Image: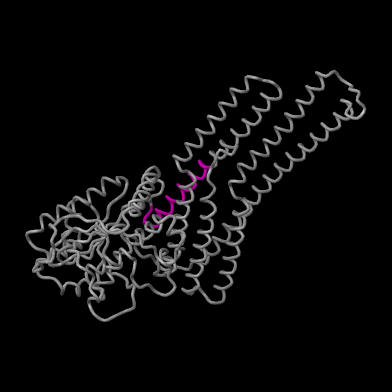
Amino acid sequence: MKKETGKIPVIVGVTGHRDLREQDTADLKLAVQGELESLRTMYPHSDIVVMTSLAEGADQLCAETAYEMGLDIITVLPMPADEYAKDFEAESLKKLNELIDCSSKVFIAPHKEPFEEGRDYLYRQAGIYIDGHCHILFALWEGTQADSGGRGTGSIVETKLRNSASVNAGEQLRRADGAVVQIVTPRRNSGSVQKNAGEVIMHGDESTCRSILRDTDNYNKDCEKAADACASDDKLSAVYTASDRLSIINDMKDRRVLIGLSACATVLTIAFLLYDEAEWHWMILLCGLMIISLFAINALTRWTRFNERYVEYRILAESCRVQNYLRTAGICREVTDIMPWNLQVTIPWVSKAVSAISAVEKAGEKKSILDIWIAGQKDYHKKALKRTELQLRRNDRMVTAALIITIATYIAALLFEIVCCGMISGTSMFAPEINDAVRTGFKLCMGAFSAVTLFANNYYGRLALPNVIDDHRKMVLLYEEAEREIAVKGEAEPLLLRIAEDELNENANWYAYQSKQDQSLGI
């Protein structure tokens, strides 16, 4: 079996007319090929996947073009294949069967809206599924307004642009950030189109769409470096492993940057004291070097975005973890349906990534998740809580020790001035040059320990340890309560969904403060 990588596929959805004009076929195919090739060029680290229902006309044209370009096809059927076949003529039915055989995945679309009788409803559910799981929608469409029944291509386009599909009770709001590439497609016996067949028109929030695709491609670029170590039998596990690994790597790099910034600021403080008080004039060179180093590290941080990557990849990993638990529990719901609004707004590429993974992921065998999710997460947060509390105590001890030594140095300096320098009596016990040397020593000691305090506050302060401790405590309480409720109610779907939503909300809170821990010069 081929191993899955941790890369996120860029999914191109397809909707369009069935009744294409024969004279337009070549131009339409050329336009589709050009747009797919453009995506492949702009996002070279990402696998482009075409998602379609393989309906006669536009769907089959796009699928054939994708197959000829060596791209994967995901087929979303509106109904069972034997029933679906009744809507096809002989030639198009032959194409349907051939393209199904060429598809990497074939399944029947789940229903997102309340059930209605009729085939139009089933077609709309397939269109809504494709809308919700693609990064960008290709619409081979003449551009007419959506019909009142919400069944045609115009309605599917409108759903993508506005995210206006009806949702099940309990789902979160979903941000409307979709983009549609309209490839002008006249219909047979329609004279309403004034534009040329194959002309490309962009609709929707193109800027946000491009940003999402760019962030996805950047993640995939990072993922290539760890591809072998993150390979797995299923896509969800592979993406979780990769994003978890990349998050840890970027966290380590981010902490090195914090240490570098804090150390440079500390050395700068001490060097300036030596220059000013001890009159070690060559220390001015070290001061200059530290200032240059601070700005260089600061610029490197902004360019490499270690902290930003750390928190975003962590959210992706945790979202994949929750999605995996829901899948393991046999719950047919997606994390994007319950993802907090602030995550959708600030890191929309993660939401789209989880949707894309869900579209290519196969269903797993239902298992009990009490041990692998609830108990496992409770134990993890308990251990993490102890580690973080130890870090905080270490920081507090360092700051307290520096403060005690600083106070002791001040008392010693005060006694020296009173007893030895004659502050009260007016009679000095030592020569003026000795007094000045001792005073300089006291100043350097006080400055050095103040610099140590500065280092500790710069480094540990940016780790937001009190917030992290509070988060771990809340998560331990969450899973302890979940264990008690499962013991009484069993692993009921509403309970597990509530736990999943609570975990995602806590992740959103964590993201809110961690994303603000931006490195600065810290002088």
Q: Is residue 30 left or right of residue 168?
A: left
Q: Is residue 94 visible?
A: no
In the image, what residue occupies the spot 78% across and 38% down?
407
Q: Is residue 174 above or below residue 315?
A: below
Q: Nearer the viewer, residue 483 or 318?
A: 318
In percent of width and height, residue 249 lies at 48, 44
Instruction: For the N terminus, give its image quadrant.
Output: bottom left
The answer to which quarter of the image holds residue 363 is bottom left
In the image, what residue occupies the spot 61% across and 23% down?
284
In percent of width and height, residue 485 lies at 56, 73
Find the residue positioned furthest to the bottom.
Answer: 117
Magenta span covers which residues?
232-254
The answer to which quarter of the image holds residue 225 is top left
Find the residue positioned furthest to the left.
Answer: 23
Q: Is residue 471 left or right of residue 36?
A: right
- What secondary structure characterizes most of the magenta part? helix
Find the residue positioned furthest to the right.
Answer: 425
In the image, what residue occupies the spot 69% across and 21% down?
279
The question of residue 95 being in magenta is answered with no
How are the colours assigned in the image? Answer: one colour
In percent of width and height, residue 12 lies at 27, 57
In percent of width and height, residue 508 lies at 50, 59
Q: Is residue 280 visible?
A: yes
Q: Is residue 13 left or right of residue 184?
A: right
Instruction: For the C terminus, give its image quadrant.
Output: top right
The question of residue 236 being in magenta is answered with yes
In the image, what residue occupies the spot 66% across and 48% down?
392
Q: Nearer the viewer, residue 373 or 264?
A: 264
The count of marks equals 0
Q: Is residue 238 above or below residue 420?
A: below
